[in-house]
């Protein structure tokens, strides 16, 4: 079973910002590749742990690396966030409490 993490509506919004291959072999399944990148970012897994239905991990990683260098993800985020209605926003308020004596013994200005 193929796993698509982006809905059809979401895919239509971001597909137009993805680069088309001008040289070399065309992408086998661009949507699966993008979903594979998303899956890695969402799960924090290693590239080698990428499920095979997203494609070969090496190819998915190469796309991620190339698109990151080209600023593709920033462009997608910028364009998609313009149309956002901001109805669902989540701000992470995680913090770690440190015992009052945890920093004792440190030299002043070292933190």
Image (cartoon, helix red, strand yellow):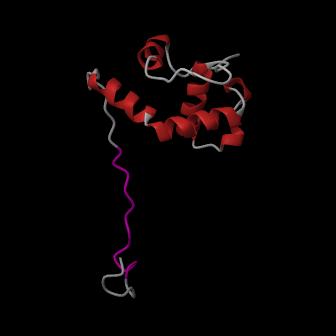
Relative depth, front residue between 71 and 1: 71
Magenta stretch in the rendered image? 92-103
Dividing the picture into quadrants, the one containing residue 77 is: top left
In the picture as drawn, the residue positioned furthest to the front comes out as: 23
Pick the quarter of the image with the C terminus.
bottom left
* Residue at x 47%, y 37% (from the top left corner): 70
Q: Residue at x 43, y 37 (%)?
A: 71
Q: Tell me if residue 100 is in the magenta stretch.
A: yes
Image quadrant where residue 46 sits: top right
Left or right for 96, reference 55: left
Q: Which residue is at the front of the view, 61 or 45?
A: 61
The answer to which of 109 and 76 lies nearer the viewer is 76
Residue at 37% from the left image edge and 64% from the top image edge: 97
Q: Is residue 97 above or below residue 76?
A: below
Q: Nearer the viewer, residue 50 or 24?
A: 24
Q: Residue at x 70, y 37 (%)?
A: 58
Q: Position of residue 48 (x, y in %)?
A: 71, 41
How far from the left and from the top, in percent, is residue 21?
Answer: 58, 22
- Residue 25 left/right relative to 100: right
Picture layout, residue 93 above or below residue 90? below
The quadrant of the picture occupied by the N terminus is top right
Location of residue 106 in the rendering, given as x and y in whole percent from the top left corner: 39, 85
Labels in figure, total: 0
**Could you tell whether 92 is left or right of 50 in the image?**
left
Q: Position of residue 28 (x, y in %)?
A: 67, 19
Look at the magenta stretch and give its main secondary structure.
Answer: loop
Q: Is residue 53 above or below residue 61?
A: above
Q: Is residue 97 magenta?
A: yes
């Amino acid at each position: 079973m193929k796993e698509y993490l982006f809905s059809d509506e979401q895919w239509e919004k971001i597909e137009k910002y993805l680069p088309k291959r001008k040289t070399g072999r065309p992408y086998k399944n661009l949507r699966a590749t993008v979903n594979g990148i998303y899956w890695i970012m969402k799960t924090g897994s290693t590239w080698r742990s990428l499920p095979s239905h997203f494609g070969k991990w090496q190819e998915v990683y190469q796309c991620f690396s190339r698109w990151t260098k080209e600023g593709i993800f920033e462009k997608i985020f910028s364009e998609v966030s313009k149309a956002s209605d901001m109805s669902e926003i989540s701000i992470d308020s995680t913090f770690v409490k440190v015992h009052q004596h945890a920093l004792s013994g440190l030299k002043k200005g070292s933190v």
